[in-house]
Amino acid sequence: MKPVINIKRIYEPSAKDDGYRVLVDRIWPRGISKEEADLDEWQKEIAPSTALRKWFNHDPVRWEAFKTKYTEELNKNEAAAPFLSQCRRHKTITLLYGAKEERYNQAVVLREYINKELKS
């Protein structure tokens, strides 16, 4: 069973239909407590490397290159297989991120990656 994967800013309130809530940032988001986050899991190991995150800096001009580089990181990441296995156990997953940028962030790339990997 392939899960439905949603993307949401961590600053938005949690909802019953969020399903399994996973923070996919390497750094804890500013100004939010663990209680407010209402997480099931924090997957910082699956987030982009610090070097890649700093290089990208949510710059739309670097978006295509970021997607390629982050996907390459995911393909080599030892945390990816256990994370994908965890994803298979849920009907609905909400990937949470802290960035202000809604279109150009790692959760968008991660959703594409999960959908591709769980297709097979």
Image (spheres, rainbow, N blue to C red):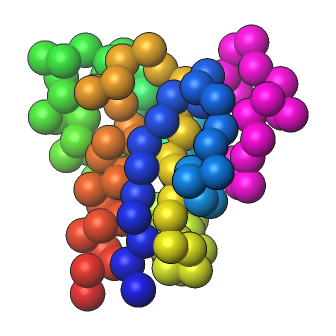
Q: Is residue 90 visible?
A: yes
Q: Is residue 99 left or right of residue 39?
A: left
Q: Is residue 98 left or right of residue 48?
A: right
Residue at the image point whose x is 42% and y is 71% from the top: 3
Q: Closer to the camera, 120 or 90?
A: 90
Quarter residue 59 falls in:
top left
Q: Closer to the camera, 29 or 7?
A: 7
Q: Is residue 40 left or right of residue 56?
A: right
Q: Position of residue 51 (x, y in %)?
A: 44, 29
Quadrant of the snapshot with the N terminus: bottom left
Q: Position of residue 99 (x, y in %)?
A: 47, 20
Q: Is residue 21 visible?
A: no
38 up-or-down from 29: above or below: below
Residue at the image point whose x is 54% and y is 39% from the top: 96
Residue at the image point whose x is 57% and y is 51% from the top: 18
3 in the magenta segment? no
Q: Position of residue 119 (x, y in %)?
A: 26, 80
119 up-or-down from 108: above or below: below
The extreme front residue here reads 16
- Read off the magenta span: 28-46
93 up-or-down from 60: above or below: below
41 in the magenta segment? yes
Quarter residue 36 falls in:
top right
Residue at the image point whose x is 56% and y is 53% from the top: 17
Q: Position of residue 43 (x, y in %)?
A: 63, 51
